[in-house]
Amino acid sequence: MHVEVDHPCVQHKLALIRDAETGHKRFRELATEITMFVCYEALKNLELEDVEVQTPVATAQCRKIANDVFVIPILRAGIGMLDGILELVPTARVGFMGLYRDEATKQPVEYYNKMPVNTDSAIYIVVDPMLATGGSTVAALDALKANGMKRGIVVCIVTCPEGIATVESAHPDITIYTASVDDYLNEKKYIVPGLGDAGDRLFGTR
């Protein structure tokens, strides 16, 4: 399953981040802003617990997030989305998943994995600006389930039908949240129209 967040503010910022003339500073800011909007939608099913809060006037019956929230950026571009989620959920724990594509097999290979200690209430949020072929996302989800993940979602800025199909086939229980489902993958496995190389654009390495 996938959810495309078509809020006008998201779509306006998406137009700005796509622009080839947008520099890396503004690209990072837009990635953070779009992530916040998409995650706002993605996290609407978090569980809540009742709490009492003493205001300056009286005791208030309130609710707070009951889940442990684990944010898992896929290195390196996923780091560009981290601040957006932490603005919404400052108490979230952060794990990191490093993957590269083997030149011979074209399959993702894990080179780094540092995760929070799993808990029964944890919801994992896997973040990567672009879900293209879906190979890295599937590899990350495989590793997280092996680590004990019971509930997880994927948040990206743009994706495409091919990437969605790959993730849904391997992990039908995972919902993908995105600002846009773009047209297709080209022969170089870039999303069209996409964003270009999100990592290079985030960190000024293009």
Image (cartoon, helix red, strand yellow):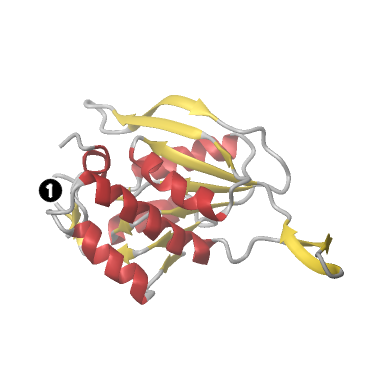
In the image as oriented, which residue stretches furthest toward the bottom? 8
Question: In the rendering, at what x and y percent does residue 98 appear?
Answer: 40, 30
In the image as oriented, which residue stretches furthest toward the top? 111
Q: Is residue 142 above or below residue 161?
A: above
In the image: residue 103, left or right of residue 163: left
Q: Residue at x 27, y 27 (%)?
A: 102
Q: Residue at x 39, y 74 (%)?
A: 7
Q: Residues within 10 Å of mark 1 (few under 14, many from 20)?
A: few
Q: Residue at x 52, y 55 (%)?
A: 174
In the image: residue 17, left or right of residue 150: left
Residue type at the position of mark 1: Glu
Figure quadrant of residue 35: bottom left
On the rendered image, what quadrant is the C terminus found in? top left
**Residue 157 seen in the figure:** yes
In the image: residue 130, left or right of residue 92: left
In the image as oriented, which residue stretches furthest toward the front? 56
**Residue at which label 1 appears:** 187
Q: Is residue 175 above or below residue 171?
A: below
Q: Residue at x 62, y 42 (%)?
A: 149
- What count of labels does the image hold? 1
Disc 1 element: loop
Question: In the rendering, at what x and y percent does residue 121 appear?
Answer: 72, 49
Question: In the rendering, at what x and y percent does residue 189 appear?
Answer: 19, 46
**Residue 182 seen in the figure:** no
Question: In the rendering, at what x and y percent does residue 164 appear?
Answer: 36, 57
